[in-house]
Structure formats: C-alpha cells, structure tokens
Image: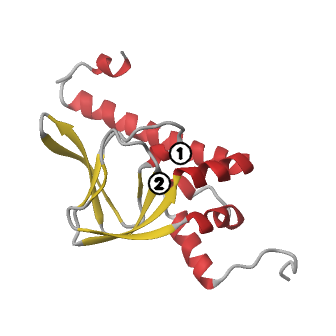
Amino acid sequence: MQNPFSKTFTPQDLETFKFLASIKLFEKLRHTEMARFLPAMHARKYNHNEVVFFSKDPSQALYLIKKGTVELTIDIKDNFETILEVKGGEAFGENSLLENAKRTYTAIVKSEDADLVVIPFFAIQEIFESNPKIKAKMMTSLAEYYNANNQRLFRSYRESFGFFRLRQMFE
C-alpha cells in the first residue's frame, strides 16, 4: 500500500525525472531530490549554428539536451576544433556546478535545431545550499565525469606518442 503522506508527482514530472535520471549529473538523485530542480528548469530552443556560449564566458547555467546535437569546440589559432559532440539525453556546461567557473569550450548547435533545458547557476547554488545531500551526490557525479575525461585524455596522449608535453597541464 502506498504511503498516503508521500509526495505524488504528475505524469509530466515523472517523464522529466526519467529524462534527468538518464543524465550523469542527476543519476544518483531520488525523485524528491530531482523535484527541487523543476521550478528552475527553463525550456529553450536554439537554431542551427547558434552559439549557446563562448569559451571564457562565466559559467552561468547547466544545459540538458532534450533534442538535437551540440558541438563543444576549443579555439586553436582562429580555428574551432570539435572536442565532443553531445546529443539528446546528455548535459554540457557542467562546470556551472562550480562557483566562479569560466567556460572551457564554445558550445554551438549543429543539428537543424535543438531543444535544451537550462538550469541557471544561481538556482543550482540555492538548491545546493539548502540540500547538502543533493550537492554531495551531484558533485560525486561531476568528479566521476571529470575522472573519466582524465582517463580519456591520458589514453589519447599515450596513443599520440606524447605529441605534446602532458606536464604543461599540471603547471
């Protein structure tokens, strides 16, 4: 028998929770924890080749892709090199979970259009301040994400026969 005092969610909320649970940063959260983000989530449509944000911009929001493809690029001597392509069910702008962070890459919509969910930095910080367990779970997911990126970086470095000085990364 269901607890009569437990929070009930609408079918739309449950669909949103399913979407959030598919994204690495939210995968450890329970529905009641995900519900804290609902008022902060804003739907936004972007067009082909529209820039979502530029490298070195302040990290003011986390972006979740409902539909579409976004290329994450780095600037190398007046050229853009794609470092990653993110699609529906993925997030980008993850360093918006950190205070005073700047974007490390430029995000550009590559599909015909893209439906994104935007969660502002200030809303994330407000949720973190009032819910340390949510912050701990999401920061653990962020650390796992960054650890996986480091593993890929080191593998790529080994496979490129040390084409660049990896030590520069730590200086």
Toward which corner of the image does residue 16 lie, by quadrant?
bottom right
Q: Quadrant of the C terminus?
A: top left
Q: The residue tagged with tag 1: helix, strand or loop? A: helix
Q: Observer-nearest residue: 122 or 108? A: 122
Image spot of residue 162 (x, y percent): 20, 22
Q: Nearer the viewer, residue 49 or 88?
A: 49
Quick one: SS at disc 2?
strand
Which residue is depicted at the point 45% across and 39% down?
Answer: 146
Mark 1 surroundings: few (<14), some (14-19) or many (≥20) residues within 10 A: many
User: What residue is at 42 percent from the left and 42 percent from the top?
Assistant: 58
Q: Quadrant of residue 111?
A: bottom left
Q: Amino acid at mark 2?
A: Leu
Q: Label for residue 97?
A: 1
Name the residue at the left extreme: 78
Q: Which residue is mark 2?
A: 62
Q: Earlier in the sequence, mark 1 or mark 2?
A: 2
Q: x, y percentage for residue 99?
A: 54, 38
